[in-house]
Image (spheres, rainbow, N blue to C red):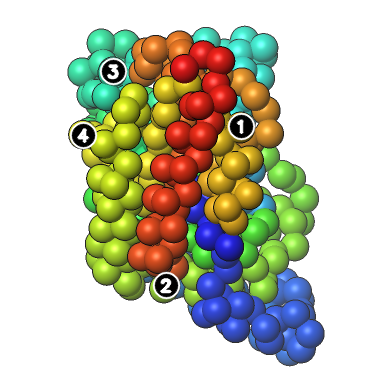
Amino acid sequence: HIYLDNNATTPLCKEAYDAMQPYWLESFGNPNSLHNTGRIAHRALAQSMNKIYTLLHASDYDDIILTSGATEANNTVLMSTYYQFIHTGKKKRILSTQVEHPSVAHTLEFLESLGAVIEFIPVNEQGLTTPEMLRSMMDDDVALVSVMWANNETGLVFPVHELAAVAHEFGALFHSDGVQAIGKLPVDLHASGVDFFTFSAHKFHGPKGIGGLFIKAKTPLTPLLHGGSQMGGRRSGTVAVPLIVGMSAALEVAVKNLDKNMAHMSYLRDKLEESISNLPDITIVGKDSPRTPNTSLVSFKGVEGEAFLWDLNEHGIAASTGSACSSADLQANPTFRAMKISADLEHTGIRFSLSRYTTEQDIEETIQAIKSSVSRLREISIVY
Ligand code: PLP
């Protein structure tokens, strides 16, 4: 079995699995309890939080709240923006891109139904949004600019640092969904200048159901979840200690070996792309733009994405159609549309996303499978 769908989720690493073990059966306490069982859990929570702050380069004045994942973190930022600025009549507009994950895109649609003005900064034909494009849309009525750090479908990396600076020039806050950045790109939250940053453990070999939201020092936030005032009142709910211990262990491994892992993934990704680049009528999306080292979105003209995926699965290869974590829905790829990639390629994108565990043999077998599958599917295609 060859797993090349790591942008959807990654296998748990052994380090995270081992680190979590004591916190299921023995040290199961609630970190808010004052007895010894609670104190042990509290200590584990504090150590894990310290690690996360250090590894992501947050300062002690910044806040990191732990959430059930990136979907909750993205909802928290966007709903808070609504309560803080739109509902109170202070500002009206939120700017974002057309290639955000549904946890941002659909939340923005909801805010639009509540009266927020949602506008999209265009992406150019390289799939990127430039600081100039953002500047031309800014005024002091913009409450928040939300632009992902790296795109889950194409791997394209946005110039978050420069975009955040433009947002600040006009007094707006800046949020970045950084889910696809951790473990694939260097992330220094302090240097990046972002006010909010979203992350999710299961995308960097941590457990599912845990993630977080970075909030820069002194940035106002209305909580999404009200209750027992955990996380300094910014995110209520009993803290999932084993998951947090697992997330911090996974983050440590991901960050400490980052250079080596980036080199490993980009070597294999480039090998995959080079080996198939001589096939006729293929498009590698964003090939010459900055991309995460693990992602390749390739379109094979005349080869329908779902059929291709099914065929690869028969070869024991797990990949994905372009549409992110929701390849079950058959909508045309929004990134393709935003990048003005011709309509006949819209349903043909296949995403290969590697991890540090992908081997050279995995890639060699995948190359063979792609070649035989593409020629067979094209032979039986009525459009090719
Ligand atoms: N944002 C991006 C860019 C993603 O790729 C994903 C993947 O599912 C999410 C958000 C949602 O993350 P979670 O599964 O932690 O809710």
Q: Is residue 282 above or below residue 181?
A: above
Q: Which mark is residue 306?
A: 1
Quarter of the image with the N terminus in it: bottom right
Residue, disc 4:
288
Residue contact at pointers 3 and 2, CB within 8 angstroms: no
User: Where does residue 292 sit, x and y in percent of width and height?
Assistant: 33, 47
List the single residue furthest toward the front. 379
Q: Please name the residue shown 79% across and 85% down the image.
A: 25
Helix, strand or loop at mark 3: loop
Crowd tier of the residue under label 4, counting other residues whose Cα lies within 10 Å: few below 14, some 14–19, many 20 or above: few
The residue identified by callout 3 is 124
Q: CA distance from mark 4 to mark 1?
A: 26 Å
**Mark 3 or mark 2, earlier in chain:** 3
C-alpha distance separating marks 3 and 1: 27 Å
Question: Is residue 41 left or right of 133 when viewed as pictured?
Answer: right
| Of labels 4 and 1, the one closer to you | 1
Instruction: Tell me the element at label 4.
Output: loop
Q: Position of residue 267 (x, y in %)?
A: 26, 58
Residue 338 appears in the figure: no
Q: Depth-wise, is mark 3 or mark 2 nearer the camera?
A: 3
Foreground residue, 250 or 49? Answer: 250
Q: Are marks 4 and 3 in contact (CB under 8 Å)?
A: no
